[in-house]
Image (cartoon, rainbow, N blue to C red):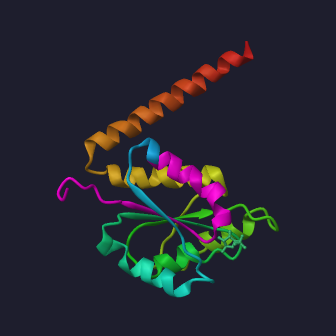
């Protein structure tokens, strides 16, 4: 029913289906906050026309934040950022050849003027990308902000309780 539809606010894109094992950590985190998201494989090198189209049309589709994961010569986050002013969060996927250092440096070393917020390599980075996206959405959304506060409280309690294992 029109008017009740909540459009997808976050787009999670990855350079290859081989990135899904990492990027699913981001979508699981978004789902835990009840965030509507879309997920896509868009390769900067194998699907360049689709990548440009995606980047240029995301804002008008209602997307608020783009999470882009890629490995190796990881140009996807930077090239998306070059074609939109939406916030782009880049996730370096752990590559086989160089353990993700190639991915990290490809994503983080953006020239001044075209930012990509780069997270850690691998699943921790994918989770944090989702949390960063939620934090951006939560600005001016008290209910979502309260969910973030609750997440931090639970994380704190779990960390404190983990010390019991030392007894
Ligand atoms: C990148 O190349 C992808 O992001 C992926 O991490 C890497 C390898 O892709 P596949 O050869 O596994 O499809 O574009």
Single out the residue that lies furthest toward the front. 1
Residue at the right extreme, as displayed = 97
Position in image of residue 157 (x %, y %): 52, 24
Q: Please report the bounds of the magenta region as a residue range.
A: 1-30
Magenta segment includes 37: no
Q: Nearer the viewer, residue 9 or 39?
A: 39
Q: Residue at x 39, y 35 (%)?
A: 149
Above or below for 43 versus 100: below
What x and y, as percent, mark residue 124?
A: 62, 49
* Whether residue 120 can be seen here: no
Of the pair 139 and 63, the residue shown nearer to us: 63
Q: Is residue 102 above or below residue 132?
A: below
On the picture, is 91 further left or further right than 88?
right
Foreground residue among 166 and 27: 27
Q: Quadrant of the C terminus?
A: top right
Residue extending furthest toward the bottom: 49
Image location (x, y in percent) of residue 62: 30, 67
User: Residue drawn 73% across and 63% down?
Assistant: 100
Q: Is residue 79 visible?
A: yes
> Please, is residue 70 above or below residue 26 in the view?
below
Answer left or right for 67 relative to 7.
right
Is 56 placed left or right of 167 in the picture?
A: left
Q: Residue at x 73, y 70 (%)?
A: 102
Task: Give the quarter the ligand 1 occupies.
Answer: bottom right
Identify the residue shown where x is 64% and y is 23%: 162
Report the quarter where the N terminus lies.
bottom left
- Judge by depth and name the residue closer to the eye, 10 or 87: 10
Outermost residue, left direction? Answer: 3
Where does residue 57 sit, x and y in percent of width and height?
A: 36, 78
Residue 14 included in the magenta stretch of the image: yes
Toward which corner of the image does residue 53 lie, by quadrant?
bottom left
Q: How many marks?
A: 0
């Amino acid at each position: 029913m029109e008017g009740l539809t909540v459009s997808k606010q976050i787009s999670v894109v990855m350079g290859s289906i081989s990135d899904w094992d990492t990027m699913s950590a981001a979508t699981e985190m978004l789902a835990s906050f009840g965030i509507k998201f879309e997920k896509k494989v868009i390769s900067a090198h194998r699907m360049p026309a689709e990548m440009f189209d995606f980047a240029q049309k995301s804002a008008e589709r209602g997307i608020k934040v783009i999470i882009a994961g890629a490995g190796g010569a990881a140009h996807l986050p930077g090239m998306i950022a070059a074609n939109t002013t939406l916030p782009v969060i880049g996730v370096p996927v752990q590559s086989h050849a160089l353990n993700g250092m190639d991915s990290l440096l490809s994503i983080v070393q953006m020239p001044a003027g075209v930012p990509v917020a780069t997270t850690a390599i691998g699943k921790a980075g994918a989770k944090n990308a989702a949390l960063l996206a939620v934090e951006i959405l939560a600005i001016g959304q008290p209910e979502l902000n309260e969910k973030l506060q609750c997440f931090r409280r639970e994380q704190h309690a779990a960390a404190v309780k983990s010390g019991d294992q030392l007894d």
